[in-house]
Amino acid sequence: MTYKKNKNQGNSNSAKKKVTSKKEKFKAVVKNKNFIWSMVVAVIIVVIIVIAFAHPFFFAPSSIKPDSYYKISDGDLLPDGHSGIFFLSWLGCPIGATDSWAIYHGINSTTNISGHVELHSALKNDIYSNDITGQPGLLFNGNFTFNYKGNTFTFYPLYMYNETMTGTVNNGTIHGSLASYGLSLINSTYPAKVAAMFNKYATDITYKGHLTTTFIITGPHGTYILNAFMYTPVSGGILGSGSPDPPDWSPNSPSYVMSHLGSSKTITGAASTFMSYVGKAA
């Protein structure tokens, strides 16, 4: 017996084939789009990885501890690629006196800055003192510039309080707390971005109600901060001998320290470290 092909059945099969063909084309388009999106995502990931390696993401520390350098910005806090060192202290500060020798030795190795400093001794009844005189040191007089690694740096010293921390540098009355006065002086003296950094770490650089010696180094390649001591004075070294607790320290005179400065490995080592961070910022 011969069966005839049902015309309707043929049409039905043809319709099914068309539907199947459309589904396959749709699946192919979806697969193609998925492939494209996968490639786009892959490229984006590769670009992010390359950028991360070439320019690592930087996060500034939320707080700092004394006696250590910290990177606090990946860029310059000054406009137009300018570089600077912002030194904050007070006239009678034994920490400022101690640090001044390393800063002086470091910068003076690039430019003669002897005309910008004066011999000085810190408060006579603070640490590193003997109730007669205090830690030998230097005071920086006004702003000055020096060149290092092709960059011109300006050094900006700012002394907040007088010798006994009972008034301004001119012995005027300080209204309010010592810390708040120090911050107001920073805000009115230093550039806004630099002042903002001192304010950001104000709690960390405050001790017994007053701001302590701190400096910021900033340049085109980054910004660094250090609070308190750049090095620990060595008993029997050129600064003096004894215990840091007053009155158990016997300070040498500032003139003695100046004449023997190059012989102190502690100070010259701190100076070298200081200049390495100046170089990093340059």
Image (cartoon, grey):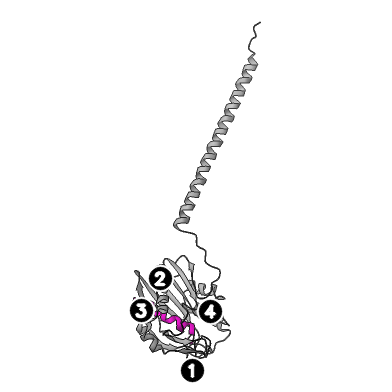
Nearer-N-terminus badge (4/3): 3
Q: Which residue is mark 1?
A: 132
Residue 265 magenta-highlighted:
no
Q: Secondary structure at mark 3?
A: helix
Q: What's the distance in space between the residues labelled 4 and 2, CA to CA?
A: 28 Å
Q: What's the distance in space between the residues labelled 4 and 1, CA to CA?
A: 31 Å
Answer whether labels 2 and 3 touch (C-beta < 8 Å): no
Q: Is residue 135 visible?
A: no
Answer whether labels 4 and 1 touch (C-beta < 8 Å): no
Name the outermost residue toward the top: 1
Q: Which residue is mark 4?
A: 183
Q: Nearer the viewer, mark 4 or mark 1?
A: 1
Q: Secondary structure at mark 4?
A: helix
Specify the label residue 276 is tagged with. Answer: 2
Taking the spot 38% from the left edge, 79% from the top edge, the residue there is 105
Q: Nearer the viewer, mark 4 or mark 3?
A: 3
The region drawn magenta spans 91-110
Where's the C terminus, which quadrant? bottom left
